[in-house]
Image (spheres, coloured by chain):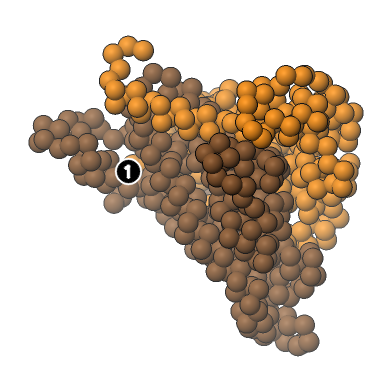
Amino acid sequence: MRNMSARGALQLAVIAAFGLLFVLPLWWVSISAFRPEDDIFRYLNPLSLWTFFPNRVTFEHIVTLWTSPFARAIFNSLFVAIATVAGGLVVCTLAAFALAVIEFPGRSLVFTIMIVSFLIPFDAIAVPLYNVMRGFGLQNSYLGLILPGIGNGLTVFLLRQFFLGLPSDLREAGMIDGMGYFQIFWRIYLPLSVPALISAGLIMFIFQWQAYLWPLLIAPATEYKVAAVAIAQFSSAYDVNFGVIFAGAMFVSLIPMVILVAFQQYFTTSVAATGGKE
Amino acid sequence: MTRNKKLLWALLFLAPAIISVIILRLWPALMALHESLLAPRASTYSFENYTYIFSDPVFRGSLWTTLFYSVIVNPLQIAVALGLALLMNNKLPTTGFWRTLILLPVAIPQSVSAVVWSVGFRPDGLINALLGMFGIGEQRFLTSPEQALACIIIMVSWVGVGYWMTFLIAGLQDIPKSLYEAVTIDGANSWQRFRYVTLPQLRRPLTFVLVADTVANFLVFAPVQILTKGGPQGSTNLIMNEVYTRAFLSGDKGSAAAATVVLVLMVLIIVLLQFRLMSDKGAD
């Protein structure tokens, strides 16, 4: 470490301590997924090196996990999250474009109503929404899982901000070339918005991957159960197998973590854009 | 292009979003309002369900628990997030790596975190083992009415701190260096630099984080349902769990709808604040 003051070293020690504290549960989950069931609690009291490093390694929990209905749940979660991103991007970019580019009467009112309604997390209205969706016969269906996630206030807001930031010369040039709004949207705005689209997609993916209350209500059947629900029900089963729970927790965490780390820079941008910066 | 033609185009672009807002948000909200006003035995609208829930000690207890929880969890998360953001802003070597580690739990579903922590909080779990290292005896954690809410606060903070920290780091990076240089020339120490430059400059992101964090924590459900089911003795019966219990376990539709309306109104107030903060940027 080059030229670090004692103060800097102390600060770094505090940061590192927090980093380790935050990653400790994840570490414990991951190593427990690879050790025999008998070993998981054996080395906790007293603490030793073997609390945090497995001395016997097994893949039995991983195999059990992937041959159980849980594999289906992981697939369901992935499918629902990806479909939400796709559908949500269509709905939200179209809306954001109209709210940023087309000057129509009542625009700011529509903007306010839309963002505020979408900002209310749908968990708050999960109970009446469940009654509405049941009326449409959408219980235990992918559509029922996906639909509530496609309207996202942060996403519309983020995309509109981004569109507002693009120079108006662009669309004026398009107009002169005889382009309609749809062509301007499709051929000028979308190609320039890839970073914003990635940020928006990331928000919706993580949001849908984490959903718990809604899938619990609308899709309780094994066929449509998502991973976040499946793992909770695993853990309350009568004969709990902790190794399998930990293996499941590891995979359910790993997938969004890989995506988050890969796109961390877009995540930070989206945060900066929606976070009330000056 | 004429005004009408513009309006037509706008409606075309907005149609999917407007339909989703109506079907997925406004319509269910109206349904809840309608049901909440239909008392079990009355044939006309009345406030019977509301007077009933507000006289019910369980519902009132859940409101108080939610309030108490909010007053603790939000400042705690923001204080830790701010402290970490300030440390990370010094750009010491390897900071980026630790920052990623702290951000990792953000990606994990709360239900998974709850399952993991439920094992950690077991009497023979990891946390008692760590405390034992410091000579602290075995704690009851989730089965203790005094400790259960604290356990939930710790768990949701593990998930939340990295997220809010990211907002505050973005805010810190926006503060012009020249401001710090100016007060340093005037002989300000590091506390004064924080008090007179950082805090005022960070006001907007801090307010945003406070508001957004409050909404998020208001609707915490998975940890409660998985870890404690509202117990022991109602000590963790946060409002979302109360609504869920009324609607799906007690099957009391009218009072569940009334509780939902109360919940939505409270969230709406905070969300309106959040929206104002997002919209009028820079207008102090």
Count up the numbered dots. Answer: 1
Q: Nearer the viewer, residue A38 or A129?
A: A38
Q: Nearer the viewer, residue B58 or B17?
A: B58
Q: Nearer the viewer, residue A160 or B1?
A: A160
Which residue appears at 20% of the width and 33% of the height?
Answer: B180
- Marked residue chain, label 1: B
Q: Which chain is orange?
A: A
Q: Please identify the residue farthest to the top as the structure is shown.
A: A2
Q: State the image quarter where residue B276 is shown.
A: bottom left
Residue hosting label 1:
B202
Q: Decide: is A194 above or below B233.
A: above
Which residue appears at 67% of the width and 82% of the height?
Answer: B52
Q: Is residue A28 visible?
A: yes
Which residue appears at 80% of the width and 70% of the height?
Answer: B251
Within 10 Å of disc 1 (Cα), the crowding (few <14, some 14-19, many 20+) is many
User: Left or right: A10 with respect to A16?
Assistant: left
User: Residue A90, percent across and down?
Assistant: 65, 38
> Dot 1 lies on which element?
loop
User: Residue A266, percent across and down?
Assistant: 52, 28
Which residue appears at 79% of the width and 44% of the height?
Answer: A235
Q: State the image quarter where residue A9 is shown.
A: top left
User: Left or right: A185 with respect to B121?
Assistant: left
Q: Is residue A167 visible?
A: no
User: Residue A152, percent across and down?
Assistant: 60, 46
Chain B appears what colour? Answer: brown
Q: Nearer the viewer, residue A122 or A56?
A: A56
- Amino acid type at circle 1 is Leu
Q: Decide: is A236 above or below A266.
A: below
